């Protein structure tokens, strides 16, 4: 394991966590982008593609970035990503046609994926010794927190802005803070890179990439993560419609309850994460979700559905960070940042695959309640793939 020579959770660790928080703040404000495009008069047939353009750019670039990024060049890449993101965010108020919006979305997607991929590459190297799972748990909190506070903030300030597009431009100054955070990191990254074996700071060869995919545990974890993220995304995008059909007065309450349970598990249980067998715990969490999600379609009322959100969110909160910890444990040390980026490729792909599968299933005649049974099947397949990984990631009781 690489360490930065500081005390556990020193400046480098917290600076990267804060940078990740700010990175996801600039994504969380786009929760209403479809409605924004409608207000601009963009035809309905173009709204979905424009919405999907940013994650598609991320999906296209991330595999390449995962191969070329190392600790030595990650800080430069993060600065480039911030500059591109600032340029894109500042351009939204002035992009009103399909071509200009598409150009801004491509620029924004490139900035985001370069920043996020470089950040996880650096983060892997600054994880404190013996606190890998806990470190990933803390990083995951910075990923989900912006979704809790940015939408209400944007709703509160938008009436005072010249036009709705300026709400997106408001996030540009936040990204300047990332540049400030990176200034002291440069010397730390250079010192650590100099102390690491040479293979940690060079691009892996094609033979190494092939061998990596054959490394026990890597492919099952990646495939399981993809299936789990696709199932989670289906729940995320379609549970509101199901809640409304059950007469929910506030159909967003399900996600509020699930997110609250996710954050509670990560905050309260994080001290124990490194003592667990991550492969086994992930498999158990996936099994719990496989059994629970089909029950969403059997809920007799919105209140029961919202109650089910609590164990669902708890299982997500326990299982998803430990995917990263399990991948860290099974990966060759010099390929840990590459495999962390591979998991982010699964996130990008899952957030595209989920809505596509869900939409096509409904178009083929599957009832909305049946969609949650499909999610259960995806979680079950992910559990089946991940379960054998537990043999490679034994528990470490002394790390609690």
Image (tube, rainbow, N blue to C red):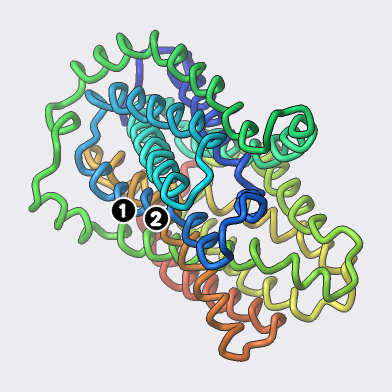
Circles 2, 1 touching at the beta carbon (< 8 Å): yes
Disc 1: CA contacts within 10 A as few (<14), some (14-19) or many (>=20): some
Q: Is residue 134 above or below residue 373?
A: above
Q: Is residue 132 above or below residue 209?
A: above
Residue 232 shown left or right of residue 179 in the figure? right
* Label 2 sits on residue: 56
Residue positioned 75% across, 70% down in the render:
241
Q: Quadrant of the N terminus?
A: top left
Asked if residue 39 shows in the view, the reply is: yes
Residue 227, image x and y in percent?
Answer: 47, 67
Residue 235 shown left or right of residue 280 in the figure? right
SS at mark 1?
helix
Q: How many marks?
A: 2
Residue 393, image x and y in percent?
Answer: 40, 52
Residue positioned 42% across, 59% down in the render:
390
* Label 1 sits on residue: 60
Which of 89 and 386 lies nearest the eye of the viewer?
A: 89
């Amino acid at each position: 394991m690489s360490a930065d020579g500081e005390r556990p959770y020193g400046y480098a660790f917290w600076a990267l966590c804060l940078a990740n928080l700010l990175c996801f703040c600039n994504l969380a404000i786009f929760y209403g982008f479809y409605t924004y495009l409608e207000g601009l008069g963009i035809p309905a047939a173009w709204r979905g593609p424009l919405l999907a353009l940013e994650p598609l750019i991320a999906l296209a670039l991330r595999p390449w970035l995962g191969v070329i990024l190392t600790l030595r060049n990650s800080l430069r890449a993060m600065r480039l990503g911030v500059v591109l993101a600032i340029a894109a965010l500042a351009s939204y108020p002035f992009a009103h046609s399909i071509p200009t919006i598409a150009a801004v979305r491509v620029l924004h997607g490139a900035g985001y994926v370069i920043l996020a991929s470089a950040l996880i590459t650096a983060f892997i190297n600054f994880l404190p010794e013996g606190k890998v799972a806990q470190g990933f748990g803390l990083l995951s909190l910075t990923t989900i927190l912006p979704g809790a506070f940015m939408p209400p903030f944007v709703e509160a300030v938008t009436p005072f802005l010249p036009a709705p597009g300026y709400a997106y431009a408001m996030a540009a100054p936040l990204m300047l803070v990332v540049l400030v955070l990176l200034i002291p990191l440069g010397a730390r990254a250079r010192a650590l890179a100099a102390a690491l074996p040479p293979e940690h700071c060079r691009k892996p060869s094609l033979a190494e990439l092939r061998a990596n995919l054959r490394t026990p545990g890597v492919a099952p974890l990646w495939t399981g993560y993809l299936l789990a993220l696709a199932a989670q995304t289906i729940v995320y995008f379609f549970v509101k419609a199901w809640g409304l059909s059950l007469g929910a007065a506030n159909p967003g309450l399900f996600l509020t309850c699930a997110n609250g349970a996710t954050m509670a598990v990560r905050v309260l249980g994080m001290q124990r994460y490194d003592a667990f067998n991550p492969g086994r715990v992930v498999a158990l969490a996936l099994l719990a979700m496989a059994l629970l999600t089909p029950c969403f379609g059997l809920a007799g009322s919105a209140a029961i559905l919202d109650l089910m959100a609590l164990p669902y969110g708890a299982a997500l909160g326990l299982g998803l960070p430990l995917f990263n910890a399990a991948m860290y444990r099974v990966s060759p040390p010099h390929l840990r940042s590459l495999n962390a980026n591979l998991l982010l490729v699964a996130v990008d792909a899952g957030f595209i695959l989920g809505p596509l599968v869900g939409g096509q299933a409904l178009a083929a005649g599957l009832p909305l309640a049946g969609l949650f049974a499909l999610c259960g099947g995806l979680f079950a397949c992910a559990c089946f793939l991940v379960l054998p990984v537990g043999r490679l990631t034994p528990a470490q009781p002394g790390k609690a």
